[in-house]
């Protein structure tokens, strides 16, 4: 499932065919929203003829810190007993191929490749055993972070919340098991992160149970599951690509704001 800009406007759409061959893959326009049983308008375009946008515009983005042991260790931190959650504003969300803007307030901005969960229905206090029923699908995220501000502020609202600091995309995969997926981040083609989601300290069902005990999750809300080791700085002119097995690749250029 994707969100697209087509010749007549913006719409949700389902993608059919081989996405690695945009001239052959087709996007089928969905009427209204993608939740529940989608209704199709009958209009379709080749994937090459539309522009992919952020696949969802969430009411909130809930991110999880220190959810890979090796990532916690690379910053000298212990793994928390419970998931460490924080919020990123929905104004930080951008889509594939949109530039990450480096703010003048920071001298050190890092990429963080992550698997992202997209919620499909309103849920509160959902147990882990039933958490999968609340999921619309999975996409890729980059939890961009102003690392120097994160350290100096003592909390993460500003460091994680700048506009363009939450790339999502390229689409939502509705038929993938998140339990053991390869995740890889590259900067200018050089591999920086290479891990598997099986190394998550708190898996997707546990995260949904924990977060939904704190706040009501609404359709379209996004949970960022955490980043593995290997995060690092990005600079003007570079390009970040994050690939998650079974989903695809999210690519964003980096520019000075």
Image (cartoon, helix red, strand yellow):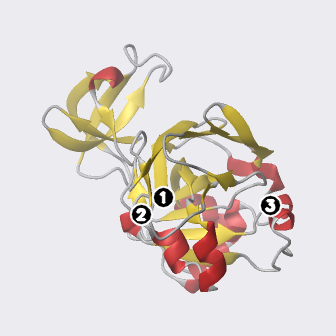
73 is higher (above) or lower (below) than 86:
above
101 lies left or right of 239: left
Q: Which mark is residue 166?
A: 1
Viewer-proximal residue among 3 and 100: 100
250 lies left or right of 38: right
Which residue is found at the position 50% from the left and 20% from the top? 20
Which residue is found at the position 71% from the left and 54% from the top? 231
24 lies left or right of 50: right
Residue 253 percent location from the top left of the image: 47, 41
Q: Which image quadrant: the N terminus?
A: top left
Question: Is there a contact, CB below 8 Å, between mark 3 and mark 2?
Answer: no
How many residues crowd mark 3 within 10 Å: few (<14), some (14–19), many (20+)? many
Determine the CA span between mark 1 and mark 2: 5 Å
Residue 37 percent location from the top left of the image: 37, 48
Residue occupied by mark 3:
71
Query: Sequence-wise, which precedes: disc 3 or disc 2?
Result: 3
Query: Sequence-wise, which precedes: disc 1 or disc 2?
Result: 2
Residue occupied by mark 2:
92
Question: Is there a contact, CB below 8 Å, between mark 1 and mark 2?
Answer: yes
Viewer-proximal residue among 135 and 220: 220
């Amino acid at each position: 499932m994707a969100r697209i800009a087509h010749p007549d406007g913006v719409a949700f759409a389902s993608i059919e065919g081989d996405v690695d061959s945009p001239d052959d893959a087709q996007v089928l326009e969905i009427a209204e929203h993608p939740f529940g049983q989608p209704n199709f308008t009958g209009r379709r375009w080749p994937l090459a003829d539309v522009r992919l946008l952020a696949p969802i515009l969430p009411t909130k983005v809930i991110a999880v810190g220190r959810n890979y042991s090796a990532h916690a260790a690379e910053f000298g931190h212990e793994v928390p007993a419970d998931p460490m959650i924080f919020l990123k504003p929905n104004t930080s969300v951008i889509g594939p191929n949109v530039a990450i803007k480096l703010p003048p307030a920071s001298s050190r901005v890092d990429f963080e490749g992550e698997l992202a969960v997209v919620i499909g229905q309103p849920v509160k206090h959902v147990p882990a055993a039933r958490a999968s029923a609340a999921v619309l699908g999975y996409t890729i995220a980059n939890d961009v972070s102003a690392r120097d501000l994160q350290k100096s502020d003592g909390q993460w609202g500003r460091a994680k919340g700048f506009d363009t600091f939450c790339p999502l995309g390229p689409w939502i995969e509705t038929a993938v098991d998140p339990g053991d997926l390869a995740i890889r981040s590259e900067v200018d083609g050089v591999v920086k992160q290479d891990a598997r989601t099986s190394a998550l300290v708190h898996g997707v069902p546990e995260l949904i149970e924990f977060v939904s005990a704190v706040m009501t999750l609404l359709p379209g809300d996004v949970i960022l599951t955490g980043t593995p080791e290997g995060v690092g700085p990005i600079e003007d002119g570079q390009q970040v690509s994050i690939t998650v097995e079974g989903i695809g690749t999210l690519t964003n250029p980096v520019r000075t704001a």
